[in-house]
Amino acid sequence: MKGVIFDMDGLLIDSEPLWQQAEVKVFNAIGVPMTVDMCRQVMGIRIEEVVDHWYRIYQWKGKSQDQVVAEIMEEMEQLIKTQAKALPGVKQTLELCREKGLKIALASSSASRIINTSLEALGIKDRFEVIRSAENEEYGKPHPGIYISTLKDMGLNYSEAFVFEDSFNGAIAAKAARLKVVVVPEARQYDDPKWGFADVRLRSLSEFGGEELDLRLRD
């Protein structure tokens, strides 16, 4: 292995509750009865696609989809600046990857402005050689495009890198790009059999490391 690609939301930063908070606030203000469970249904895809998904169902009046996206993003940026925190094992995993001589990249469904705000809030932006947002792709996750583009930016092929993902859509995208996948699902989903396609399953990034894991990724 020569490189590693990290997802961001829900893996590096505990942002899923923040996204849920922002989406519930903005959608409820326009008459969409958004709940946390509804937010979870679309976890891991681009915010533009989230808004489009709910517009097809509720078709609200008064604000365009672009305006709703902008309001969610603005709310999210403020929440990140005031509440952002790294998930367990983030900095030690990044350091271990650096020690192993791996190229380190990030491939996120979030917009570039959210990525930059998040990485700066956590103080880890300088750890990544490549940072790519799915806003620059024709299709977001679960389409593999962002991972294919990130590999190209890294100068690697699919057999030379592996991916850390927390969402089902993201893990499917990585697998569709023929990459090895380490999934770190949220606790309530850890035992779900749907993760059976992943190469490695961890409860948190704190578990990453050791000869057994390295061997499983090389197989």
Image (cartoon, rainbow, N blue to C red):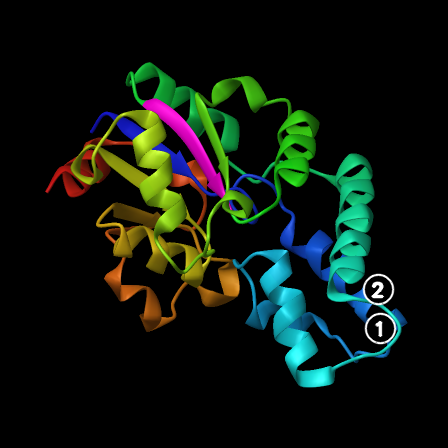
**Magenta residue check for 113:** no
Nearest to the observer: residue 185 or residue 150 = 150
Mark 1 lies on residue: 28
In this picture, is 15 found above or below 156?
Answer: below
Q: Look at 24% across and 46% down and name the residue there.
A: 179
Q: Position of residue 46 (x, y in %)?
A: 57, 56
Answer few, some or many: residues within 10 Å of disc 1's Cα (few below 14, many 20 plus, some between 14 and 19): few
Q: Look at 74% across and 82% down and name the residue there.
A: 59
User: Which kind of residue does numbered mark 1 sit on?
Assistant: Asn
Q: Which residues are magenta?
A: 103-108
> Quadrant location of the N terminus?
top left
Please say if the residues under marks 2 and 1 sit with CB atoms less than 8 Å apart: yes
Q: Is residue 186 left or right of residue 26?
A: left
In this picture, is 102 found above or below 191?
Answer: above
Secondary structure category for the residue under label 2: helix
Observer able to see residue 143 = yes
Secondary structure category for the residue under label 1: helix
Q: Is residue 34 left or right of residue 179?
A: right
> Quadrant location of the C terminus?
top left
User: Which kind of residue does numbered mark 2 sit on?
Assistant: Lys
Observer able to see residue 208 = no
The numbered dot on residue 25 is 2
